[in-house]
Amino acid sequence: MARRRAAVEEEFVAFATVRSGPLYRSAYFLTGGDAHLAEDLVQETLGQMYAQWHRLYRPSWAGRIDNAAGYAQTVLVRAFLTHQRKRSSSERPSRVLPEESAHERDAALRMALVDALAQLPPRDRAVVVLRYWEDRSVEETAVIVKVSSSAVRTRCTRALARLRSLLGADLAELVAP
């Protein structure tokens, strides 16, 4: 029994090691560039995954986890949405960016995108990140965010239009060769 538990814990550690980076990147975009909150969300996700890890080994159980990576992504998005509901204030500290160097065009583009994403409502941001960063289908996104497929399509359309208006000419300047 102790060997089995040690093997399961080793498997979880391996999973956490491999998935921490992708989870952090998704969390970073979900939080609108808040690295500290992204780290907290990843830790919360991995903690919940550890608590549910035994569900991988129940072949006939209805609550079995078939895709650990997908389940972790779902837990991350739901943790983010829960955090957004619990926030008592939407204040965010402002950033003062250093002068741009010649090789920072990609960084400037990334920062502009992160800043624009941060201005979207949390559910719209979650839908955009899942659909276009995580490359999830409309149906998968709908299940994770707990809305209908048509609501996902509507949110995507509105969120992308909002991003275009926020980025406007800045995007053309950042992408230009």
Image (tube, rainbow, N blue to C red):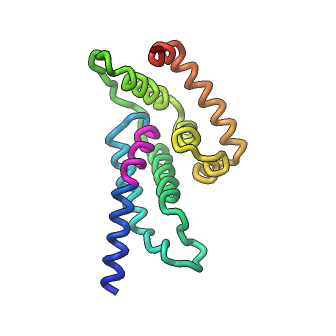
Residue 75 is a magenta residue:
no
- Give percent across and percent down for residue 141: 61, 48
Residue 139 location in percent, x, y?
67, 50
Q: What residue is rendered at 51% in x and 59% in y?
A: 71
| Residues drawn in magenta | 19-31
Above/below status of 67 relative to 1: above
For the stretch drawn in magenta, what is the main secondary structure? helix
| Figure quadrant of the C terminus | top left
**In the rendered image, the vertical position of residue 15 relative to residue 34, given as above or below:** below
The N terminus, quarter of image: bottom left
Question: In this rendering, would 44 be left or right of 160?
Answer: left
In the displayed structure, does residue 103 sit left or right of residue 132? left
Vertical placement of 110 versus 155: above or below?
above
- Location of residue 9 by image quarter: bottom left
Residue closest to the eye, 121 or 63 = 63
Residue extending furthest toward the front:
177
Q: Residue at x 33, y 64 (%)?
A: 13
Side of 15 relative to 150 (left or right): left
| Labels in figure, total | 0
Give percent across and percent down for residue 172. 51, 15
Q: Which residue ends up furthest to the right in the rendered image?
A: 150
Which residue occupies the extreme bottom position in the image? 1
Residue at 41% x, 56% y: name it: 45
**Res 28 → quadrant:** top left
What is the x, y in percent for residue 88?
42, 40
- Is 12 located above or below residue 162 in the figure? below
Front residue of 62/119: it is 62
Q: Kindly indicate the quadrant of the structure image that contains residue 111.
A: top left
Taking the spot 39% from the left edge, 49% from the top edge, the residue there is: 41
